[in-house]
Image: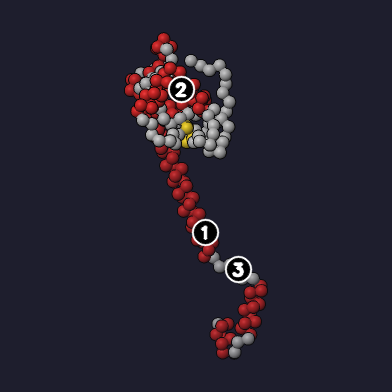
Amino acid sequence: MSSSSTPRSMTAGARNILRSNDSASLWNYTVAPGWSINEAEVLRKALMKFGVGNWSKIIESNCLVGKTNAQMNLQTQRMLGQQSTAEFAGLHIDPRVIGQKNSLIQGDHIRRKNGCIVNTGAKLSREEIRRRVAENKEQYELTEEEWSAIDLPLPEDPQLLLEAKKAEKIRLELELKNVQRQIAMLRKSGGRKNAETDSVDSPKTEQEDDDREDFIEDQPLGKRARIEA
């Protein structure tokens, strides 16, 4: 299922102002940290094939090696453009369609976090969730013929890919520690320089020297000698 028209970017409103880490169009895969555009597209197809929330089946398919349930759930929220995924649980849907719809919703009553619409009302009851699932199934679910025909890309060697991801994670952690160490050194060096600057007496001006000499001249001879000494 695809949309023939290109959705407009979401206009910033009074309470849905876009930040630098948000996407103006939620349907265009604003990836969560640790995701590539390609991985997000694979997840989209996996959701269509296995259904929203069926993380175990996605993991078993080996189409997204190394991804956890929490990571997939977070990226699904970003593709849907909303934090709550309960109303799509188990449905074989194209998250791009929902994201496109959500990207056009505006108003003072709409609040977003990281580009996703958040529920500001009361917690949905089970009955309400079931009603929404049934409604979304009617409107958005793919036919079994469509979702069963979806082919997911598989890595040639899942174990090799997992090891590469672990090595990349270690590299990034070391790089982060190095940056943190450099920041700490700069802060320490800056504090030391400020302390040295504060401890140095400022040079006396010519006027200050003249004032001191006048003060000494005004003193009695005994006291003047002590001051000059």
The structure residue drawn at horizontal position 44% and vertical position 36%, both measured from the top left corner, is: 120
- Sooner in the amino-acid sequence: mark 3 or mark 2: 2
Using the rendered image of the protein, determine whether residue 107 is visible from the camera's viewpoint. yes
Q: Position of residue 151 (x, y in %)?
A: 42, 13
Please tell me whether residue 10 is drawn above or below residue 41 in the rendered image.
Answer: below
Of residue 136 and residue 162, the one placed in the foreground of this image is 136
Circle number at residue 95: 2
Label 1 or label 3, whichever lies nearer to me, is 1
Secondary structure category for the residue under label 3: loop
Disc 1 designates what residue? 194
- Sooner in the amino-acid sequence: mark 1 or mark 3: 1
The structure residue drawn at horizontal position 38% and vertical position 18%, both measured from the top left corner, is: 50
Disc 3 designates what residue? 203
Q: Position of residue 92 (x, y in %)?
A: 41, 18
The structure residue drawn at horizontal position 40% and vertical position 11%, both measured from the top left corner, is: 144
Of residue 207 and residue 130, the one placed in the foreground of this image is 130
- Whether the residues at callouts 1 and 3 have beta carbons within 8 Å, the answer is no
Residue 64 quadrant: top left
